[in-house]
Amino acid sequence: MKEETNNQVYLKEEEDYAHLVPPYNLLQQERISWFKKNLPYFEILKSTNISRKFNGRVSELFTSHYCSVQFFMTWISPTKSFGKREFLTLESLFKAHPKGCLIILSHTLDSPSGTMIFKPLVELGYRILLVTPDLYFLFENTPSKSWFIDLKNGKKDPGKIPLAQNLSNLIRLAVLYKYGGVYLDTDFIILKDFSRLRNSIGAQSVDRNGNWTRLNNAVLIFDKSHPLVYKFMEEFALNFDGNRWGYNGPYLISRVVEKVKYYNFSILPPRAFYPMNWIRIKGFFNAKNDSRWIEAKVLELNEKTYGVHLWNRQSKSMKIEQGSIIDRLISTHCVICNDI
């Protein structure tokens, strides 16, 4: 009976998530009409008794526990999509930050089935809060509010890109602006303590002179109410384009930073979070490389890198080969270390 109930929940979540993806061949006005028709199915956009407890639950965690670092993640996908790779991200996070606090904003994981996924870590004493976000609270008194209202009123084209992706781009900014801390994607291996990092963005690539050419939003570290984060939300609301992948995410961060000055923030070199680009990430999963190169690279990463972005969009189907760089990093930076 319990398994049948779980299957029903998973099926409902998958149906809800499917409603966040518009048919690809629709024209703009058709897409807006589609969105208005499907609006009742968008659970994450609703204000409910559960979502309205969001700020109270987050504040309670921060006031009742010491948090060496406040981490935030988002998860808009179905519960069962949270797999072993994502779990290993959490293991490495707590290996480096045993006194850190992790808040995962998710209306799907904030459930009995979601709680079971994280039970092994919670039983070890790690502080994890699975919480349904209150978008009305998060976007209040920010530039995000006007975009959100226009979207819900059918005045904004959600675009061809899955809405979940763009909601994640905006939610991470809003939660950092409200609380401050570290936003982190779920496809990382964390290697070092973040507690000394403040108001920082990682460069994805640099030119020959070491000047950044592309920034990324897979890791964002900012104080509460930081003006640059406000600028990011402003750019999102004013120039939203749901038809171009990355336009409201990493490209947005790059566009804004290129224009602003004197905002008290640091840009970290690619080795901090993006030591291997997405085109060549397969080399980190492959054990057939020169063993001396693997040994040297693992040593270099452990010394100079805070976290390795795994580029899950490209690497999710790649097998972690025994003896590979990823295998060796995970083996060293896990806390439960099952199913590596």
Image (cartoon, rainbow, N blue to C red):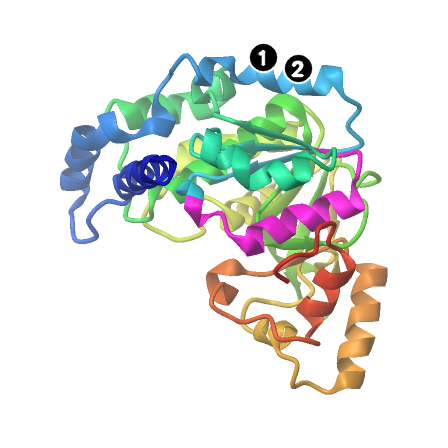
Left or right: residue 6 compared with residue 139: left
Left or right: residue 333 compared with residue 317: right
Is any part of residue 235 visible from this angle?
A: no
Q: Quadrant of residue 177?
A: top right
Q: Which residues are magenta?
A: 80-101
Q: Quadrant of residue 300?
A: bottom right
Is any part of residue 71 visible from this angle?
A: yes
What's the residue at 38%, 35% (across, down)? 2
What's the residue at 64%, 41% (across, down)? 120
Residue 187 at what x, y percent from top left? 58, 53
Tell me the SS state at disc 1: helix
Residue 226 at what x, y percent from top left? 67, 27
Q: Amino acid at mark 1?
A: Gly
Looking at the rendered image, the quarter that the N terminus falls into is top left
242 or 61: nearer the viewer = 61
Looking at the rendered image, the quarter that the C terminus falls into is bottom right
Residue 91 at what x, y percent from top left? 69, 48
Magenta-drawn stretch contains 114 = no
148 or 334: nearer the viewer = 334
Q: Amino acid at mark 2?
A: Glu
Residue 83 at what x, y percent from top left? 51, 52
Pointers 2 and 1 in contact (CB under 8 A)? yes
| Badge number at residue 264 | none
Q: Quadrant of residue 104?
A: top right
In the image, residue 148 above or below residue 76: above
210 or 52: nearer the viewer = 52
Q: Main secondary structure of the magenta part?
A: helix
What's the residue at 76%, 56% (across, down)? 333
Tell me the SS state at disc 2: helix
List the residue tagged with mark 1. Answer: 56
List the residue tagged with mark 2. Answer: 60
